[in-house]
Image: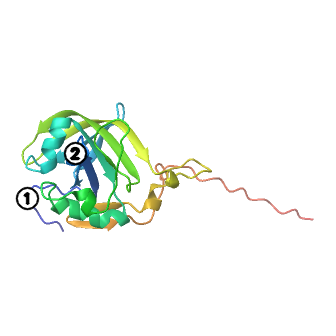
Amino acid sequence: MKESWKPGTLIYPLPAVLVSCGAAPDEYNLFTVAWTGTVCTEPPMCSISVRPGRHSYDLIRRTGEFVINLTTRSLARATDWCGVRSGRDYDKFREMGLTPGAALHVAAPIVEESPVNIECRVRQILPLGSHDLFLAEVVGVQVSAELIDPATGRFALERAEPIVYSHGTYFALGEALGNFGWSVRKRPSVQVRKRSGR
């Protein structure tokens, strides 16, 4: 049995990310975004949706740059706090004990404590209603070297314990269910050896 609800944004869970912005240390800011996503592979592009009234909105609109910083269990409190406090009133890096680091291709800072920092340059701003969509090209990515398996080169993000947001609640990710394509992968054939009658 189903209930009929009014139209709404119920595509959950979503990544809860910290977006950093600002072109100089005296204006660096962080804010939490759950409405973010991948939109294109070549060129690599992503998006964030931001309310025009937010402090960071004007910073990103002016500079045309931002960094998406993936979050983890250890960053859960900072992720929530930065979503309910305004950069007009607080230095969020200092309040949360986070380290602004140098991005490679944009002026906005990275969050050193984040395992993945995705440097973005705005290509288009789409006014949609309550939020504007910042469509951006990914111009650089930094990842934590300690999460790279030296034997295989695999980036093991799960070791950082990433978190997601679902309808007002943060969750840690659970067990792995299978790698991409596992549902159609052929199982290795089992060869049965016949015993000799001797």
Q: Residue at x 12, y 42 (%)?
A: 58
Decide: is 62 above or below 148. Answer: above
Residue visible at 13% across and 50% down? 55
**Element on which disc 2 rests:** strand
Quadrant (top left/top right/bottom left/bottom right) for the C terminus: bottom right
Q: Is residue 58 left or right of residue 117?
A: left
Disc 1 versus disc 2: nearer the observer: 2
Tell me if I can see residue 4 in this picture.
yes
Give the CA distance from mark 1 to mark 2: 24 Å
Q: Front-most of 93 and 64? A: 93
Taking the spot 9% from the left edge, 42% from the top edge, the residue there is 128
Q: Which mark is residue 189?
A: none
Looking at the rendered structure, the secondary structure element under dot 1 is loop
Among numbered discs 1 and 2, the one appearing first in the sequence: 1
Residue 85 in which image quadrant: bottom left
The chosen color scheme is rainbow
Residue 32 position in % (x across, y down)? 23, 56
The front one of 103 and 84 is: 103
In the image, residue 133 sits, relative to residue 169, either above or below, namely above
Measured from the top left, where is residue 69 in percent x and y?
32, 51
Q: Give whichever of 110, 124 is nearer the camera.
A: 110
Name the residue carrying label 1.
6
Which numbered dot is residue 48?
2
The answer to whether residue 132 of the structure is visible from this angle is: no
Farthest-out residue, front? 26
